Amino acid sequence: MDENRWVALMAQLGLQESRDQWCALQNAYAEKHRHYHTAEHISACLQHLDQVKHLADNPAEIEVALWFHDAIYKPRSSTNELDSANWCSDFLQANNLDPSAITRIHQLIIITCHNAVPATNDEQLLVDIDLAILGAPENVYWQFEGNVHKEYQWVPGFIFRAKRKEILQGFLQRERIYYHDYFFERLEVQTRLNLQAAIARL
């Protein structure tokens, strides 16, 4: 999570540098209970965004949503996305960003719950970016699964396996997992192989 990139993003949005907010995000993503939802995940998402900015309607809005989308992450909470979205909105409101942009960014973060169909082009793009890890090479994918399990190590094994299987099968049952052809063409096949293998292990 490059500080210079954050400062550049703030300039794109017409906001002050807000380096204190960057520090707050750094501290959040460094929490000890995190194993996957870390600064490394955010950096990977931003790298994916760099490849598809030309597909976005408002790339700066997607980027700020990515910075914040896992900012609040408590494994026992069911409101992480909402809490993260509200933190982002509070920050943007305090810096006088246009209210319509704040509303769009808030919804971009909410859509990472992955329990609703994204309604806009930018929402679809952000969802694809967030799910790109599912189509990673096999060794990277298994590290991801291991890190997710670590974040839920307090959950009894049989419950974790049942819930994880349900989530992964939900993705497999979709007609296509990725909305944009860029991600579909590059990741869809490997994603389905990874998910099938993970379900088999569960």
Image: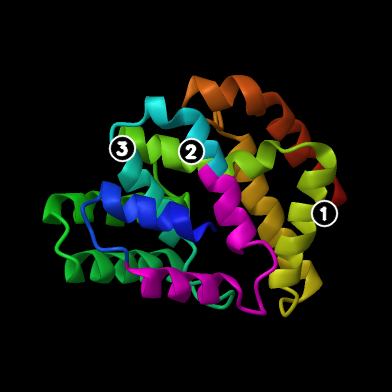
**Residue at x 41%, y 31% (from the top left corner):** 53
Identified by mark 1, the residue type is Leu
Mark 2 and mark 1: span between their CA atoms?
32 Å
Along the horizontal axis of the image, is 123 left or right of 80?
Answer: left
Q: Measured from the top left, where is residue 88 in percent x and y?
A: 32, 65
SS at badge 1: loop
Quadrant where the image shows the N terminus: bottom right
Residue to which mark 2 is pinned = 49
Query: Coloured how?
Result: rainbow
Identified by mark 2, the residue type is Leu
Do we see residue 5 in this rendering? yes
Q: Is residue 163 magenta?
A: no
Residue 163 drawn above or below residue 43: below
Quarter of the image for residue 143 reads bottom right
Looking at the rendered image, the disc whose residue lies closer to the viewer, 2 or 3, is 2
Q: CB atoms at circles 2 and 3 under 8 Å apart?
A: no
Residue to which mark 3 is pinned = 119
